[in-house]
Amino acid sequence: MTRKLIIILIVFICLLGYVEGKEGPGGPGGSTGSSDTGSSSSKRIVKLDLESMIKNAETWKKNDPEEFEYLKTLLSKPFVTTDEYRWPSALMYYPSSGATVNRNDELDIRSYVWNSNPIEIRRVLYITLEIGEEGSDEFRPITDVQKIQTNEYDKKYNFTERKWPEIEYVRDLGATGNVTLRIRVQDGQYDYNSTDMSGDRPDEDMFKEISLVIINNPPQITDMSANQGPVHWKDPLEYAVLVEDADGDPVAVTLHILDEDENEFPEPINRTQQVIPEANGTRVTFTNAEYNFFDKDDAGKNFTYSYSYGDGMDRRETKTMQGPHFRPNPEIRVEKTDMEPVGGANYYWWQGYDFSIHVQNPKMDNLTVSLYTDTPGHPDTRYPKDVVIGRSNEFVKVEFPDVHPFDVEDCDEQFGYRFRYSAPDQDGKYFTENIPGERINPKIVRYSIYSWVMVTNILLVLLIALLGGIAMERWFYR
Amino acid sequence: MTYSYSYYLIGLVLFVVLLAGGALLHRLNLVRTYNRLLSVSGGVSKEKVEEALFTPQGSNFNAAVISAWMLLFVALAYFYFLTPRVFPDLNYFLVADLASGPLGLFIFGLVVMLVVGSVGVVSLRLMKFYGFYGMSRGMKAVIMLTVPVLMVSISFSVYLGTLYPAGDATGLKAAVLATLLFSQIVLLLPVYIDTWEAVR
């Protein structure tokens, strides 16, 4: 605009110079700048350079602003409107036939503008893509303004096209559900929409407006993992999950740490991370080292957790998972577990076995220690007699003497054993790990043939056979 | 199949063949005798023939024979089902509570006798078959002697059980099987002798 004004001023000054040449130097508003004056007997031609003209204009603007404004008004070119001016037509080109689209679908949508006005009266057009969402009569712009210059049109058919660079995928529309797209056209004087056009051109895939049903693919969460425990509260803990979103939307993932009954705490423990998932998913982790979820007061407690996640359109929750289970703080120390067969290391099933464990118990008045034996035939079987011990700052040997934990079913099987106690040990556990024992001797008959037990058994068989014979003969065969 | 298994299998087959053969021959003897009487005396019922042919053998003999039959099956059970040697999935030691107790062996034998006794009571006719044969005192004595022979067989089987799983003890097994089959043959001897005489 400024350049136009300057050009007009130059023309005007030239005219003034011509007039001044006629009136002689010192005419009204005469130039004070340098000028070359040609000599002639009847008229003088004044040549002005651009620099002195600009200086004159600046002087006028400063010294006589009112006159200067009048001069601007006088010299400005009025907006040309003629009765012949016709509104340029604008339609949207949408080659896809589908009205239902996913947010991750590519979106090829353009504007086609026809301007049949002669170039002399064409105006610069400003076009914008607008969207109207379901339940609202309002349309809002979703693109920057595209400018179409007067000389951009095809010379033969008077049309031009525009593709909005910011709209490549359906998700770039920033909406879901039923939406309507249209073009807004402005030329400085008129402001209208593609919906004002006379009709569609379906054969050419051009429409006044486009209605789409946009489906959002909600984000997915898989591969949830966490340290279930039992673990120490100081152990490195990590909640991890794989986040995916087919639309590539940013996903807000919130970890909810809950109590063992799957309820939120009075002050909820929630942490959120924003991720833009990659094509194969992005692993999101929440570590205790970073977020300090737990402290020493949580020793011995059990927790559960779940996730909620959303992409701004859909929000979902996972089921609640177990973990972590924290070991309690230790109250006793245990060591030196032992097992010895009584009366020789034959490991017969009928043999007695001495089991023992050393326990240091400085805090508990009544610490109960239990013995469990384990065979395939009798898995994890508790010995019925527990041992109860009092406080002791020293290690005390807790003994289970002459235990007969096996029977004939356990022959030729490997056995194991473990101890349980009523207070947490140095590892925060209430039990020892299963301690492997020996293979039980395959001999199945406990007594020798000469033993009184075997003789008694055989004689009893004979006795019953004879008595049975006599009884049956008397009762049934007489 | 190992040698040991075939050994047990042959013994079991022999036992079944002898038992089934005895029952079959006894039946044939009855039919043959009935037909002979029928041809001589005309119309007479089968029951009356059986009644007429029945000879009481004495209470002591009957009681001893019943005991012997029960012990025969106890001996068979001890030989085949006492240890996992023959039937790993079907033997006395799978009943751990019973086998682990001091009187388990006796209870095992008692159960066998109860089963055999029950079958004997139900099939009275089968158990009465000694009354159809004329037996000398010597034969009766031999039949009654099967009781101690079967006790020997049972004792050997128990001894085999105490050795398990060590040792093959083939000789001992042969002895058990021999005493078992010998006793069975002796118990069925009247049937086989009668048949032999009829054939001759």
Image (spheres, helix red, strand yellow):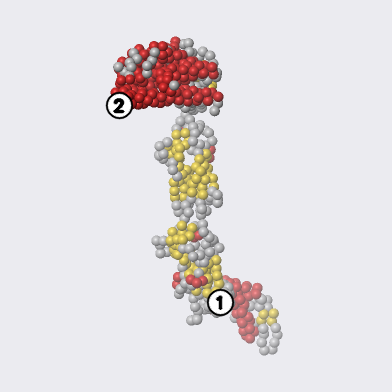
Q: Is residue A263 left or right of residue A81?
A: left
The residue under label 2 is B42
Q: Which one is nearer the viewer's eye here, A434 or B20? A: B20
> Which residue is pictured at 55% across the width and 66% down the height?
A163
Q: Which one is nearer the viewer's eye here, B15 or A108? A: B15
Q: Residues within 10 Å of mark 1 (few under 14, many from 20)?
A: few
Where does the C terminus of chain A fall, quadrant-wise? top left
Where does the N terminus of chain A fall, quadrant-wise? bottom right
Q: Residues within 10 Å of mark 2 (few under 14, many from 20)?
A: few
Q: Which one is nearer the viewer's eye here, B20 or A401? A: B20
Estimate the x, y position of residue A151 in percent, counting from the top left: 58, 74
Estimate the x, y position of residue B2 in percent, counting from the top left: 55, 26
A401 to A199, vertically: above or below: above
Q: Chain of mark 1?
A: A
- Say which element carries label 1: loop
The residue under label 1 is A157
A465 to A1, vertically: above or below: above
Q: Nearer the viewer, mark 2 or mark 1?
A: 2
Check disc 2 and give the amino acid type: Gly
On the question of residue B122 being in view, the answer is no
On the question of residue B42 being in view, the answer is yes
